[in-house]
Structure formats: C-alpha cells, structure tokens
Image: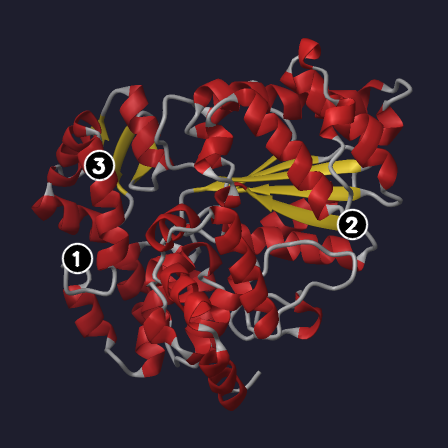
C-alpha cells in the first residue's frame, strides 16, 4: 500500500471506526475505548479486526494471529502524528514493514539486527517435541519481534502457529480461575477454527487445571494434523493476579511434563510447543523464577544491544557513524533497543542532531519523556522502591540494597547488577530520576 492508497482508505473509514482507531493509536486500552464509546470490548476488537482488513492486512488461510502490530506500523509509516510513541514499544527497535508478502515478512531486512544467539536457540528448541520456550525482558526490548520471527520460521517449516495475547482479554477474565481457564480454552479453540464445546467437556468437580488439560487432550489437540506452536504473549498480565498465575504456571509445567513421560498421552502432547513471552517488570509479589514454572524449558532473556549491533543498526539507518558516535549515544542510553532505535530514527529524519538529542535526553523536553514518565509513575506507586532507587541514582558507584528491591529494579531494567550491588543501567536514568525523585 502506497501513500495515495493509504490516504484514500483512511478517508473511507466510518466515523465510529475512526473514533476507535484514533483511540487505539493514542495508546488507549480496549477497555478504555469501550467505556468511552459505551460499547463492549468485543465490539472494539471486532472493529479493529475489520480495520485491518480494510487496510489490506489479512491472515493467510488457516492462520490466526493478531494483525494489530501491522496496522500500527502502517500508521507509523504514513500518518505518524496519530501514533503514540509508547504504543510502538514492543514492535521497536525493529518496526514491521506494512503490507508485507503473506503478512509474515515482519522485519525490514535493512534495519533489523539479528539477536544472536537468541534467535538460533529458539529455532533449535521449537522443533523439539513438547518444547517450552520462555522469552523474557523488561518492556521495550523487542520480545514480540523475536516471537514473530520464531513463528515465521516455524510456519515456513510446516508448523501450525497461533498467538494468544492476554492484552486482548477483558478485565473480567482475570477475576477468578474458572473464568480464566474457560477463556483460555475457548480462545485457543476459536483461533483453531473449532466450535466451543466447553459445556460438553467441562465438569466442575475436577477443577480448572484438570478440565483445561482434558479439553486440550480430548478435543483441541486431536483436531490438529501437524505440530502446533501456541505462543502466549504478554503473560505478565496474568502474573499481576498471583492466585491465577500460580495455577496457570502449574498447568503449563504439567503439560510439559506429560510430553516427557512416554505414556499413551505423551505423543499427543509432544505435538504442542509452547512459547511464553512476558515482561520482567514487576508489579506483584510473584517471582516467575520461583513459581512452579521456574527452571522449565529454554529461558531466553533478551539483553541490551552491543556496540557492534548498534553500529550495524546505525549504518542500516543510513548514518555514516563510527564507533565514537555510537559510544556517545550508548553512554547516555546504554544498549536499550527502544531508546537506541528512537534516537536513530530522529537523527536519520534530520529532526535533531546527536549532540542536541543527548543534551535534552534526560529532560521532559527530550525524546524519551514518555518512556521516563512511565517508569516514574511505577516508582511513585511503590514508595519503598522509589526510596531505594533514589539512593542508587544519587550514589556514584555501586550500591547494595535488599534483595527484593534489587530484583524489582533489575526486572524493570532500571539497574545493572554486579554480585549483590547495583547502579543505574544508563546515565539517562541517573540524571532524570535524580531530579524527579
């Protein structure tokens, strides 16, 4: 789709759909949009799905995955003034190119830097029967893009793959375990194109995890004729509800165990491969590493970009940079993919020079203000955590904190570790939070 086709399609969008579209691009949740327009969240999602089709974004036959990222990328390219930069957090530093062949060439090869060796590890693991992969990192580190590349590779090898994003679940889904379990079963079945038969297979006397396992084992898995990769994205939303999360982790671990047993059901469960994607930003008392899921499967923790990777990315943006210029940028933001990408895009466009960008970076006038305010809002909700981080940013050198505070600050990406001590993960955080906190 070129600019002219895009403009023509945008003008044809009905007023109601345009209201929903603009609110989505502004970063509002489905729940917030529904309340503002006095409609249901299901209606919001239906309109967004129809908008994807209107702009030429469609699934291939037999494929079921969200096209919302491609719709966001389309507007980021042709009408960027409508897109909240924070909305792109999980789709940068490598924004998918809109209107791609088969809707699956999600990465423009000219700006993508392969995350070595993490992609290779995922490619190798996903073909193993009963595989379970956990991709984790703080927000805006490129987890969703890595997931899509893994699924794209798997589809090309003949695997069936679908993504279930917990961000699309209504808030009522997380109200109790029975509601959550039935939603999970029904959503996977719907994505597989199967009718809902929960009333037939569900028996409350057996409990939620047994019922969910039975629904998969007796109904969903027998319906597939090739290995199924089930990608669960934004699972951190489940972790905010520990009473549900603990049982959910036990469920996933149980499925992984069944595939290993070698009994009569193992062959069926070997057809299922799980990919779990979650942010490590901690908003509850649940530590996933010490949950029933801890130590299971391949754990991929995405790190920051290296100097060579940033230099490669800068050159692919058309910037004739050498190592000293990259070092200046990384001196401010480290190797954080989103912060690096945002800087390169602004400099490439001619909006700002590197020196002016660095000067304004730790201020409200800088390009990182939205990112910084998000972290500030989180810290202000947890005074004890904020007090600990004040000590970190005001101290030159390493600081020793309580283990719980170290874990949470590191999970948020705000600090780097050395043994039991921490310091700000980049100068941007030190300078901004030293003033704001």
- Are discs 1 and 2 less than 8 Å apart at CB? no
Identify the element where label 1 is drawn.
loop
The outermost residue toward the bottom is 4
| Residue 395 position within the rendered picture, expressed as x and y whole percent measured from the top left | 13, 37
Residue in the picture at 64% in, 43% down: 231
Instruction: Answer with the quarter of the image where residue 399 lies.
Output: top left
- Side of 134 where 11 appears, left or right: left
- Quick one: SS at disc 3? helix
Q: Can the viewer see residue 311 in this picture?
A: no
Mark 3 or mark 1: whose residue is earlier in sequence:
1
Residue closest to the far front: 38
> Is residue 155 depicted above or below 214 in this figure?
below
Residue 96 % position (x, y) = 54, 67
Pointers 2 and 3 in contact (C-beta within 8 Å) = no
Residue behind mark 3: 379
Kindly identify which residue carries mark 2: 160
| Residue carrying label 1 | 362
- Of marks 3 and 1, the one in the foreground: 3
Farthest-out residue, left: 435
């Amino acid at each position: 789709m070129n600019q002219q086709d895009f403009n023509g399609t945008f003008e044809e969008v009905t007023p109601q759909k345009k209201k929903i579209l603009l609110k989505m691009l502004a970063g509002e949740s489905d729940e917030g949009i529904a309340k503002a327009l006095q409609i249901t969240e299901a209606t919001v999602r239906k309109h967004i799905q129809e908008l994807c089709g209107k702009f030429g974004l469609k699934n291939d036959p037999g494929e079921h995955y969200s096209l919302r990222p491609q719709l966001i990328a389309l507007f980021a390219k042709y009408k960027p003034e409508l897109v909240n930069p924070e909305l792109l957090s999980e789709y940068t530093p490598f924004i998918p190119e809109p209107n791609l062949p088969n809707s699956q060439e999600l990465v423009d090869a000219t700006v993508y830097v392969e995350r070595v060796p993490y992609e290779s590890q995922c490619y190798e693991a996903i073909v193993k029967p009963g595989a379970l992969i956990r991709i984790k990192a703080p927000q805006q580190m490129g987890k969703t893009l890595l997931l899509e590349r893994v699924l794209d590779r798997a589809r090309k090898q003949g695997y069936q793959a679908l993504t279930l994003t917990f961000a699309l679940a209504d808030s009522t889904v997380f109200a109790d375990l029975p509601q959550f379990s039935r939603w999970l079963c029904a959503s996977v079945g719907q994505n597989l194109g199967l009718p809902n038969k929960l009333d037939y297979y569900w028996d409350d006397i057996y409990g939620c995890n047994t019922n969910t396992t039975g629904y998969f084992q007796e109904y969903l898995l027998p319906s597939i004729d090739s290995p199924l990769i089930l990608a669960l994205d934004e699972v951190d939303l489940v972790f905010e509800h520990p009473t549900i999360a603990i049982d959910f982790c036990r469920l996933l671990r149980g499925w992984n165990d069944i595939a290993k047993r070698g009994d009569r059901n193992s062959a069926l469960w070997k057809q299922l491969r799980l990919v779990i994607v979650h942010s490590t930003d901690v908003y509850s008392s649940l530590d996933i590493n010490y949950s029933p899921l801890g130590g299971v499967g391949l754990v991929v923790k995405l790190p920051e970009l290296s100097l060579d990777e940033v230099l490669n990315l800068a050159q692919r943006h058309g910037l004739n940079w050498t190592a000293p210029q990259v070092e200046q940028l990384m001196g401010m933001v480290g190797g954080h993919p989103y912060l690096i990408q945002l800087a390169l895009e602004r400099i490439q466009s001619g909006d700002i020079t590197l020196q002016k960008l660095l000067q304004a970076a730790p201020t409200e006038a800088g390009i990182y203000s939205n990112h910084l305010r998000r972290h500030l809002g989180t810290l202000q909700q947890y005074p004890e955590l904020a007090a600990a981080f004040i000590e970190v940013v005001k101290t030159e050198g390493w600081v020793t904190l309580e283990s719980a505070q170290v874990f949470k600050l590191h999970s948020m990406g705000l600090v780097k570790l050395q043994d039991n001590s921490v310091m700000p993960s980049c100068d941007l955080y030190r300078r901004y939070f030293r003033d704001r906190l």
